[in-house]
Amino acid sequence: MAGASARSARNRSRSAASEISDADPLLRGGRPKQVPKRFKRGLHGAIRLVNTNLKLLLILTLAVVVPTLCVSFFYHYVWIPGKGAAVDRQLKRVAAPLSAQRMTDLPQFQGDHKESLYWGTYRPHAYLGIRSRTPKSLLAGLMWIGMQNGQFGVRHFCQDGDEIKRYGWLEHNGRDYGRQEIIDRGLKLTTSFIKVKGNGSGYGGDWAVRIEADVEKTSVDDIDWGTGHLFFYMADEAGNSLKPGREGRSFGDKELLAYGSRKDVGGWELHLSSKDNLETHFAGFRTLHVHNLTELMYGAISVSLSMSGRLELSDTAEKSSNILVFQISGKLPFKSDISFVSGTEMKDSKVENRVDSLTGTSLYDLLRHKQKDFDEKYARSFSGADGLDSGSASVGKAAIANLLGGIGYFYGQSKISLPKGLHLQNGDNFVRYWPSPLFTAVPSRSFFPRGFLWDEGFHQLLVWRWDLGLCLDILGHWLDLINEDGWIPREQILGDEALSKVPSEFVLQHPTNGNPPTLFLVIRELVKGMKRKQFSNPQTEEISTFLERAFVRLEAWTQWFNRTQSGKEPGTYYWHGRDNTTTRELNPKTLSSGFDDYPRASHPDDHERHVDLRCWMLLAADCMHSIAEHLSSENKDVYKKMLQQLSDFETLNRMHLDNTTGAYFDFGNHTEKVRLRWFIEKRGEAQIQELLRETLEAPKLQLVPHVGYVSLFPFFMGIIPPESEILGKQLELISNHTSLWSDYGLRSLARTSSMFMKRNTEHDPPYWRGPVWMNMNYMALTALRHYSQADGPHKERAGSIYEELRGNLIRNVVQNYERTGFLWEQYNPKNRGKGKGARPFTGWTSLIVLIMGEVYPDLTAVQVKTW
């Protein structure tokens, strides 16, 4: 989940070298203001350099063009005239990577590892999308004709408005296999993906997709489909032209759909095989804005229907087409196998044999074998979860499959906001981060198909237990995003496809604002696992090598928090980025905390102290101290001192504890006497009605009396001593039915809070003001399990609450999945636990797998320490 941005569905904002010259203006990072639907034929290649002295041209380029470009870049993207050298230096640092060796350049991420992950279902925003882990990739994907509100439409990118009854991966191993089921108004599609490295194949190997189309009419509203219309496409982001197979060759019952060549994979071919009576057509387009393919398809289909009354593509292609779409139509049910083979230009490529091995009965056998492997690995990785009833086991498998199937590869440049009031010479109010790749899981394929920093730490608690190499690769990509200041943008919107899913007002990232450093959750587990000798020798070596290179980056990140998020008193912290001028929010949001609209101090200022951030920093200090000890770093005393300061229980209590309730609270300039009410303002001849905040009582510095997830953070982190009476009070808060407890999980905000389930603006429904969230419930269970095993007077009470809460969460998630076909972003305790928010939300809601398997982090290292 991505709690890092305003997370209503609308506003949460939650390799081979490039094969095309950067000099091409159509391929630069910025998008043109007006994007043509298609490029005119013959637009490229019309101007040639004849009899040019290449050496002279190179000298001229180096002497004139390169300096000009550098000056232009500095003038337009870095230098702000009249704003002073300090601002210039600040902006340079924001847009500069940390001066350290890149994590992804480690030898363990090269060679076979890198090639084995080259192809994958790395376009999670598409119902089925395949790409390679390279910036300008060859793309593949599936579209089909569906119906909505009595009209036919093209299904392509996952979106709630399509009203798909259900879709998601039933199995996926994160590397080379996945099986997905889609049910759309009576049309049932089963898509299976597999990847192999065979003799003769090019870099990254070959892959195949089996598409099974059938009818599954489960309600009177479903359509009686007679014929199904599918569209499978290939597209080259780098602009390389693709050749339709009808200009090539076919053999047996295999139809050659397309072929081409690239520097990364060499020659390649795409084949279609089916025993059913299918009709095929194609269309080719030329555009570098591949994310607009859906609109191109609408246009092509509309032309076909208007001219012939038939739904069929034109069997024509624009000159130098870099997108080819293949229509596959047939009477339902039917099945088709699509195979991609690489390295076809090599002498012993054995294309026919390789295509045969990826179609028909051979493909069926491969898929069955991979499905069996998935089931066995699930049982090994989450043994407790596999022992539950069959319904729960199916949900658990779907949860991990969707998390792994939601891993994507993105490439682009984040847009970083300038300080308020500043603009570049070209009018932009942002600078661009350096071009970056990101390999990451995503919270939701429909709403948030991109990387979110605080979500990813929770995602990797599952991924490392499934596939350690995959986890380290993902962590390495995230750590490579640290800039010279030690900051990581919390939301990664990289590339045109990712950008197309985000409202413009939520694109800019603010370098003053952080996000919970949840990557330490998984790094802590890896360090402890090594100490427990949990890993094999090769795995231990990989982790140790990873940490040795990561240490400088983790240090920079930790220091950034200490430098920029510290409070007025030593050892205190507060989340920067709250708007202290807004009049439209009941309580100014704290997006950087991940808790968005969770109520903090009513009037933000630098007196604030946020208890959750203090606890996150204790986790960071504990983790950094452990790594420093493991590496025998001379900096270990620095983190020992930080650990001593933040683990001082008396100081924590003095700063944040309400002795009466036993709850931990934020501190700040606060009043409870605020409300939203309608104001009418006359503007010219018109009267404007606005819902604005009204303060009825002057705020004062005090604890902010809202019981909720923030109140439990010292408990979540295991900081409270097992014998403390405060622990008893925390258990009372958790189990109190009038406060946080519900039969569906712990509420994010107590029913007794004045902000419980209240809207924050006219358009912002409550988000972290009552609904049940899986990541925090997982942290609660982790703490309950910890205290149920620690000697103390509250041991039995913690154990009984643990059992009941775990049962409630599993039951509710399973029932919602069986009823709706989805895991949800949050669950509504006021409506019998009904799923709400984004769906499918298979990011941290997938933690239900660990809950089923009773797999939790070890909290012993973050208990109060005495020296």
Image: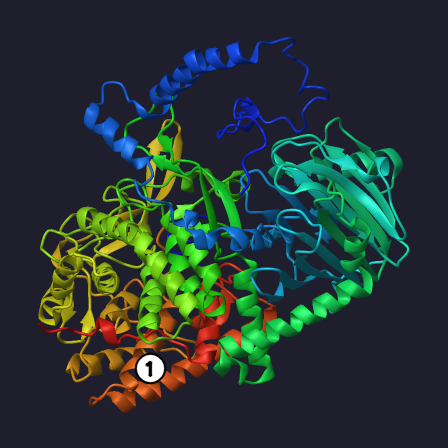
Along the viewing direction, whichever of 28 and 300 lies nearer the viewer: 28
Choose top left, top right, bottom left or bottom right for residue 323: top right
Left or right: 446 in relation to 608 = right
In the displayed image of the protein, which residue is found farthest to the front?
347
Could you tell me which quadrant the N terminus lies in?
bottom left
For residue 8, say whether it is visible.
no
- What x and y, as percent, mark residue 756? 33, 65
- What x and y, as percent, mark residue 188? 74, 63
Along the viewing direction, whichever of 804 and 243 lies nearer the viewer: 243
Along the viewing direction, whichever of 552 and 729 lies nearer the viewer: 552
Choose top left, top right, bottom left or bottom right for residue 183: bottom right
Question: At x 28% / y 72%, what residue is drawn?
Answer: 716
Total residue callouts = 1
Left or right: 305 in relation to 580 = right
For residue 860, say whether it is visible.
yes
- What x and y, as percent, mark residue 177? 63, 62
Near mark 1 (Cα within 10 A), the count class, few <14, some 14-19 or many ≥20, is many
Choose top left, top right, bottom left or bottom right for residue 461: bottom left
Question: At x 68% / y 19%, what residue is drawn?
Answer: 43
- What x and y, as percent, mark residue 173? 58, 65
By what rule are the colours in the image chosen?
rainbow
Give the amino acid type for the residue marked by disc 1 in the picture.
Arg
Left or right: 521 in relation to 219 = left
Circle 1 is placed at which residue position? 785
Could you tell me which quadrant the C terminus lies in?
bottom left
Question: At x 31% / y 59%, what residue is drawn?
Answer: 598
User: Could you tell me which secondary element the residue under label 1 belongs to?
Assistant: helix
